[in-house]
Amino acid sequence: MGSNFHERMPLVRLAICLMVGIVVGEQLTGQVYWWLVLAGLVICTLLLWRYEYWQSAGIALCFVALGITLITRQPDTSPYGKSETHQLSRVERTRQRCLQWRQKLLERYEAQGLEGEQYAVVAAMTLGDKSALTKHVREVYSVTGASHVLALSGLHLGIIYTLLSFLVVGKRWQTLSQIICILGIWAFAFLVGLSASVVRSAIMLTVYALLSLGHRDKMSLNTLAFTAILMLIVNPRSLFDIGFQLSFMAVGAILLWLPVFMSVFSESYLMDHRLVKWVWGMIGVSLSAQLGVAPLIAYYFGRFSTYFLLSNFIVVPAATFILYLSLPALLIPGFAYLLIYIVKQLNTCLFYLAAIPGASIEGLHPTKIQTTMIYVIIVAVYLLLLRLKPLLHVT
């Protein structure tokens, strides 16, 4: 992150301005025609085309005004993707039809012998249905820091995208292959109900797939910011959704912190020691994501899971096997038995882990200001480590 951050990551600044506008607009009262203010700012910004600095400031103010306009014109909370326009109501009807198909798949799981806790975990992990999860199972996954595998997110869609890419991507038909992958990702997103985390992941993977055709930087803070801008324009109240906040903070932290952790070892060393690369990569991703979400989890849920590193080494490979086995398990009983066995072993490991003394620190309830200051400290440490980065290599 150098001095030219604004030039390399322009969408990050715009996304922040949009969020600021939404937060400010949520607090405003009274009748103000903010769309007129927005229009005036746009005109003024266009007139400043000769003055780069002032035009940049004008663009930032336009996005703040856009955020205020969006939130003040949408006073009623609505599910993501739901709107009064004809186009989005059609999307909502498609979503409802897909949920009916999801119910048929859930019934197929039961017909294949999945029941109890095994059925509940598979239903949540593969189709996003958490209705069968008991309070005990939710608590165990929460205490061990494994709740993220029960909520469909980038991990799950990334696994699905990897599988689709392996099955269909070819050098001769790369454009068609990526289109098929994108359609498959969005079909799954509709099937599981278009939650905020799933939509975020689907948009990011779509951008990733499109950029891969031009061999460009596929996954960056710009991509994440672009995704946030799209989602907030469609539904500005997504900003206040806990899942939205956790999802974006986790991915943003991984994009920022993972390169720092991976730089501890030189690239040549990691290439020669593949096991070290895999283990350290898992540790890096887990630590990065935790830096992004731990303050929010403490704020909303009052908990910090101390064994999150160990649990991730268990749940991430297990989740991969479960997702890969879920489709054949719907058709072939033998795969269903294997799926049941893996889920049973996963639950057993997490139950033992949750029973270890000190598995989680409870009673953490930082205020908004304290939570903000924690993030300020995390960012300050990140900037300091960037300065020290050349000294951290292990050869």
Image (cartoon, rainbow, N blue to C red):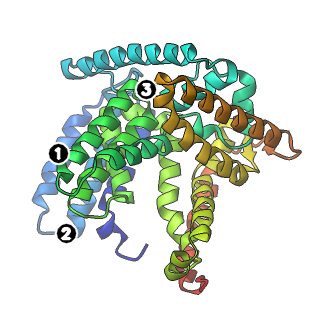
**Are there few (<14), some (14-19), or many (20+) residues within 10 Å of tag 1?**
few
Where is residue 285? Give x, y as percent. Answer: 57, 58
**With respect to residue 256, does 388 lie above or below?**
below
> Can residue 321 be seen from the camera position used here?
yes
Where is residue 367? Give x, y as percent. Answer: 67, 44
Tag 1, which secondary structure?
A: helix
Give the quarter of the image for residue 282: bottom right
Q: Quadrant of the N terminus?
A: bottom left
Left-right relation of 116 to 91: right
Depth-wise, is mark 3 or mark 2 nearer the camera? 3
Residue to which mark 2 is pinned: 52
> From mark 3 to mark 2, how far is it between C-alphas?
45 Å
Q: Earlier in the sequence, mark 1 or mark 3?
A: 1
> From mark 2 to mark 1, how far is it between C-alphas?
18 Å
Give the quarter of the image for residue 350: top right
Question: Residue at left 33%, top 21%?
Answer: 82
Give the quarter of the image for residue 145: top right
Question: Residue at left 37%, top 31%?
Answer: 188
Residue in the foreground of this view, choosing between 150 and 277: 277
**Are there few (<14), some (14-19), or many (20+) residues within 10 Å of tag 3?**
many
Tag 2, which secondary structure?
A: helix
Where is residue 193? Give x, y as percent. Answer: 41, 24
> From mark 1 to mark 3, how far is it between C-alphas?
41 Å
Residue in the foreground of this view, choosing between 308 and 70: 308
Residue type, numbered disc 1: Gly
Residue to which mark 3 is pinned: 192
Question: Residue at left 66%, top 41%?
Answer: 146
Residue to which mark 1 is pinned: 40
**Are there few (<14), some (14-19), or many (20+) residues within 10 Å of tag 2?**
few
